[in-house]
Amino acid sequence: MESQATLNSIQKAVWDGRLPLQISLAPSESRIYDQTDPYLISYPRISYLPSLLPRLRAFFASSLIDPSSHAHDGWFSFEGVPLKWHLPIGLLYDLYAGADPASKGTAESEDAGWDIDDQDSPLPWRLVVHFSDWPDEELVRLDADGMVMNDAFINSVKEADFLRNGTAKGIMSLSKEDSSGLWKSVQDVELPSFQRISNILLPPLNQPFRNIPIRIFLPLPPDSGSPSLKVVQSPVPPSIPPASVAASQLALSRSSITPQTQTVGSALHSLLPHLFPSRRTPVLAKPVLHGAAVPMSAPVEELVRSSAYGDGWLYVVIRMMG
Amino acid sequence: MQKVSAAVVTRRSVEGVLSAFPLLTSEEFECACRAFLDRIHVLGNLDRVGWSSIRFVQQATGPVLKISRSIHNASIPYYDDTLSAPVDIEEPQVEICEDDPEALIRASNSSNCLHIEHDVILSPTYQVPVLYFTLRRDSYPGPLGIDEVYQYLVPDQYRRELQEVGVMGGISFGYHPQSGTPAFFVHPCNTADAMKQIAGQQRVTPEAYLIIWLGMVGNRLSLPLPHELFATEGMKNPQGLG
């Protein structure tokens, strides 16, 4: 296991990650159709879209045909697909924007491919905000007090906690103050207060997780027209139990009895053997996390301790190669 | 495949007891669903319990047990005075919608027909079954909300428990893990404990586990099970299910 300091510095880089967004008002809701100025902002990848709604509602107030809508009536779409607000913005971008992930060796400058006038450039990410016609068949409605978002976040934290420990007693035993503080620290992108509370939840470094909270998002055929996502989740332990190592190998050497570290490659190979025929090399597809290609050799427990989203989950997007 | 006989107890020797009780493995869940489906088909007519269909579907992300139900409730008003109107779901004002579409058109208040789609899936996190459901009403365009769920589906005696996150967890609104569409679900984080309390002393088969669980969660959502399921030796209606 890498040292806590190394894990913390990776975590800081993850929390510092930002995306430039260009958000337009849905033309059908604007007094001047598509002539409304867009709202531009650089926003943290780990944040959630609804946090932007109050300022967007205020920014677009004078353009709205229907002035009676509220901030929490707001929802976002990208190329006509309503975006699930319970997923962090960075994950939505990795899923939908079709941008190539950054990877080691491709020396590109920070703002490569950045062109505000070129509609085809992936950045800034161009989203549309709507304040009416909530898509009830696709999105859970928000409420004025933010309770719906808070509940969704806490449910997700609870699940991650259950996978790590085998019980959800950790999150249940958090004080009310800390449990709302956790959500607030993610909303405000306050890493120090987030770390203080999540350290109560996480087992210490010398105590391995029972399972890794990881969900794998699979690519959809580009013409599927379906907004639904295919998500794979299955218990992934941080080490590969000796039982799954071939019996002959066991007989050969004592060393193979010690459990092997579960890497991104070994986890993907066991969950998706057709997409990941090799544990070491991405052949057909590659895993993407926070906009970057993840090394197949990265140990999953180190990865989740350093690079999980605010709810404690690793959300890995699979991108086809070729 | 062995022909289903009446008593759960006879299956025990075939299926064996659960390996990780109170949790279910995905193999045990699938086995439970198939056995349950066989048993329901032997019982035949589902009209008595108001089920319009029950299916087992193997989807890419895992197996699902799907139960559809329609209830025609003359006491459902168009404009709801939530929770103050006495809605007595368990009494027989609840009628089954007829399958004949013309019959529905002739009915004077067909728009009061409620449709509930239940999907039972195995939670990959909690390793217990989870019930996802949506509630719709004829003549209403979208899915109905949580107020209507409490008003039409949750019997009085469970209302407080579910609203306060009781033994079976509260009702949450979230995304169906397979379709990705909005759906209600009964939060599974207390299911393992509840199963241990109720079935802890018995050596349960996967199917018995599923029936006990479905009985527990079904009671809270007015989803009745055919009583024959319980009227067998070794599967008496356990306390806490009533």
Image (tube, coloured by chain):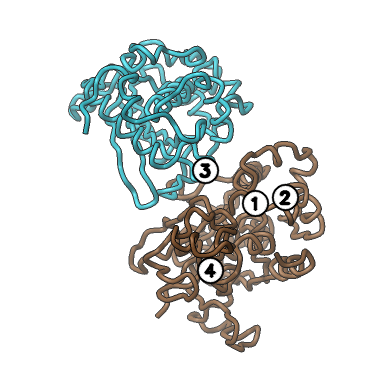
Q: Which residue is mark 1?
A: A209
Regarding mark 3 in the picture, which secondary structure is present there? strand
Can residue A33 be seen in the rendering of this structure?
A: yes
CA distance for labels 2 and 4: 29 Å
Q: Which residue is mark 4?
A: A94
Badge 2 and badge 1 both on one subunit: yes
> Which residue is painted at 71% across and 52% down in the image?
A207
CA distance for labels 3 and 4: 22 Å
Badge 2 and badge 4 both on one subunit: yes
CA distance for labels 2 and 1: 7 Å
Q: Which residue is mark 3?
A: B174
Badge 4 and badge 1 both on one subunit: yes
* Three-letter amino acid code of the residue under disc 1: Phe
* Three-letter amino acid code of the residue under disc 3: Gly
* Three-letter amino acid code of the residue under disc 4: Asp
Whether residue B32 is situated above or below residue B232 in the rendered picture = below
> Which residue is painted at 58% across and 57% down in the image?
A239
> Which residue is painted at 23% across and 23% down in the image?
B98
Q: Which residue is mark 2?
A: A203
Counting residues from the start of the chain, the first of labels 2 and 1 encountered is 2
> Cβ–Cβ below 8 Å for labels 2 and 1?
yes
> Picture coordinates of residue B37 (x, y %)?
28, 30
